[in-house]
Amino acid sequence: MDNILETMHYTWGRKEIYIIYYLGKKRIDTLYMELVSY
């Protein structure tokens, strides 16, 4: 069971990190633009 989870984590880990990073950066950029516009 642990081995399967480790394999899944290794396979999907990078994609999830990339997606989270992309969404987070997009959100931060949006918040930054909102703050600057005030």
Image: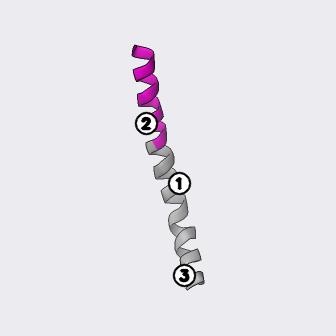
* Circle 3: residue type: Ile
Mark 2 or mark 3: which comes first in sequence?
3
- Label at residue 17: 1
- State the scheme by which the image is colored: one colour
Give the image location of residue 24, x and y in percent.
47, 42
* Circle 2: residue type: Arg
Crowding at mark 1 (Cα within 10 Å: few <14, some 14-19, many 20+): few
Callout count: 3
| Mark 2 to mark 3 CA distance (whole Å) | 33 Å
Residue at x 53%, y 69% (from the top left corner): 11
Crowding at mark 3 (Cα within 10 Å: few <14, some 14-19, many 20+): few
Give the image location of residue 3, x and y in percent.
59, 82
Residue at x 59%, y 82% (from the top left corner): 2
Q: Is residue 17 covered in magenta?
A: no
Q: To which residue does mark 2 refer? A: 27
User: Start and end of the magenta stretch?
Assistant: 24-38
Q: Is residue 15 above or below residue 9?
A: above
Q: In this view, does 23 lie above or below 33?
A: below
| Mark 1 to mark 3 CA distance (whole Å) | 19 Å
| Mark 2 to mark 1 CA distance (whole Å) | 15 Å
Mark 2 or mark 1: which comes first in sequence?
1
Q: Is residue 35 covered in magenta?
A: yes
Q: To which residue does mark 3 refer? A: 4
